[in-house]
Image: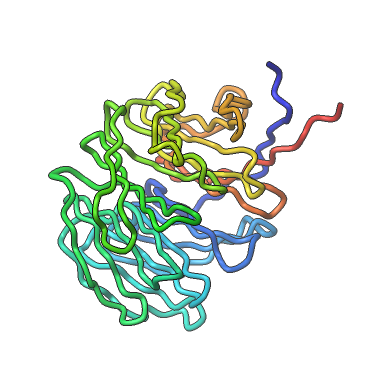
């Protein structure tokens, strides 16, 4: 099947001195944050992409960022047993919250409960009270790393991907395990609910994309060999009709969110893509631009436009 759209590389953003691990939305739709192994947290503007602004520098690698729009905070998860709370208005660290000594691999937050959830390298799920800015709960769920988190858009459920190949569905209030999803044969590196919450998507070191039916007790709906190597991240387009995956195989792939069919491959050979593992994606509402970051120290900005019929 011919792809319905074409891809063009708009620009390459450079400035990070080491692998770039994570991307996150910023206050304005045309802006986003990046961070990685150099401990630098930068803000970029897609309308002026050549000028990255350093907003924070921490002492170790950053794997996870989370923007809290209601407070204009950026939560910075780094490898040094603490969560930094950056007040973007004041451009200052508001609080350093001490944590167990493990890497923070993912951060999600629930506005309704005013809590942030952190997936830690020691297999723990940590809960932070955002009003008191303190750790209120630590729940050890695995001997291996907790790698990724997703909040259901309407139900009080939290999906947690683990390095023991399982995905746990937790009650958001009690953190009790409601069910365990088995099928992946490698660490689960990314989980994402579809915007309407009908499906949970997951990606793993086993290179498979798996689709789970939320309303049917999370039965497996599809298992797709999506990449050659580890599937690192899943991101939905602003309108929810497409999603993208990225991989250690250096490629980004774009999929139909209704049929789960592959629509486009973005790689080095065809589009001057990344030279090493693509770690995270950010799909911006600004001109529908897709942003990817990589171990090659660069950030790429892609334009996806529908082909003229």
Decide if residue 62 is in sight here: yes
Q: At 68% across and 47% down in the image, what residue appears?
A: 288
Position of 125 with respect to 290 (left or right) is left
**Residue furthest to the front:** 216
Position of 80 with respect to 277 (left or right) is left
Question: How many numbered marks, from 0 up?
Answer: 0
Asked which quadrant contains residue 50, the reply is bottom right
Q: At 16% across and 63% down in the image, what residue appears?
A: 100
Asked which quadrant contains residue 62, the reply is bottom left
Position of 81 with respect to 266 (left or right) is left
Compared with residue 172, is residue 297 higher up or lower down, i.e. above or below? Answer: above
**Residue furthest to the right:** 309
> Where does the image place residue 175, in percent across and percent down from the top left?
26, 58
Position of 289 with respect to 295 (left or right) is right
Compared with residue 161, is residue 128 higher up or lower down, i.e. above or below? Answer: below
Compared with residue 121, is residue 252 higher up or lower down, i.e. above or below? Answer: above
Decide if residue 200 is in sight here: no
Compared with residue 288, is residue 76 higher up or lower down, i.e. above or below? Answer: below
Q: At 45% across and 55% down in the image, what residue appears?
A: 155
Which quadrant is home to the C terminus? top right
> Where does the image place residue 248, in percent across and percent down from the top left?
39, 31
Q: In terms of depth relative to the viewer, which is nearer, 91 or 217?
A: 217
Q: At 45% across and 69% down in the image, what residue appears?
A: 111
Q: In terms of depth relative to the viewer, which is nearer, 4 or 279?
A: 4
Which quadrant is home to the N terminus? top right
**Residue furthest to the left:** 143
> Where does the image place residue 161, in percent across and percent down from the top left?
31, 43
> Where does the image place residue 67, in percent across and percent down from the top left?
47, 65
Colouring: rainbow
């Amino acid at each position: 099947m011919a792809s319905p759209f074409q891809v063009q590389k708009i620009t390459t953003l450079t400035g990070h001195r080491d692998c770039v691990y994570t991307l996150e939305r910023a206050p304005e739709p045309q802006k986003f944050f990046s961070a990685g192994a150099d401990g630098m947290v930068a803000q970029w503007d897609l309308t002026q992409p050549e000028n990255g602004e350093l907003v924070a520098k921490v002492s170790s690698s950053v794997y996870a960022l989370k923007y809290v729009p209601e407070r204009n905070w950026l939560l910075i998860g780094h490898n040094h047993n603490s969560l930094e709370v950056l007040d973007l208005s004041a451009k200052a660290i508001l609080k350093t919250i001490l944590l167990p000594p493990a890497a923070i691999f993912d951060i999600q937050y629930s506005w309704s409960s005013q809590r942030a959830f952190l997936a830690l390298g020691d297999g723990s799920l940590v809960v932070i009270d955002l009003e008191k800015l303190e750790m209120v709960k630590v729940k050890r769920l695995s001997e291996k790393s907790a790698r990724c988190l997703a909040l259901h858009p309407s139900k009080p459920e939290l999906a947690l991907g683990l390095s023991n190949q399982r995905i746990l569905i937790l009650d958001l209030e009690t953190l009790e395990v409601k069910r365990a999803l088995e099928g992946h044969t490698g660490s689960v590196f990314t989980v994402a609910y579809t915007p309407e919450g009908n499906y949970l998507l997951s990606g793993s070191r086993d290179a498979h994309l798996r689709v789970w039916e939320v309303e049917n007790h999370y039965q497996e709906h599809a298992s797709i060999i999506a990449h050659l190597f580890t599937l690192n991240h899943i991101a939905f387009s602003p309108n929810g009709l497409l999603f993208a995956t990225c991989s250690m195989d250096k490629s980004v792939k774009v999929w139909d969110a209704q049929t789960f069919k592959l629509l486009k491959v973005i790689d080095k050979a065809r589009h001057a893509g990344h030279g090493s593992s693509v770690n995270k994606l950010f799909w911006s509402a600004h001109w529908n631009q897709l942003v990817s970051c990589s171990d090659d120290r660069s950030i790429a900005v892609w334009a996806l436009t529908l082909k003229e019929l």
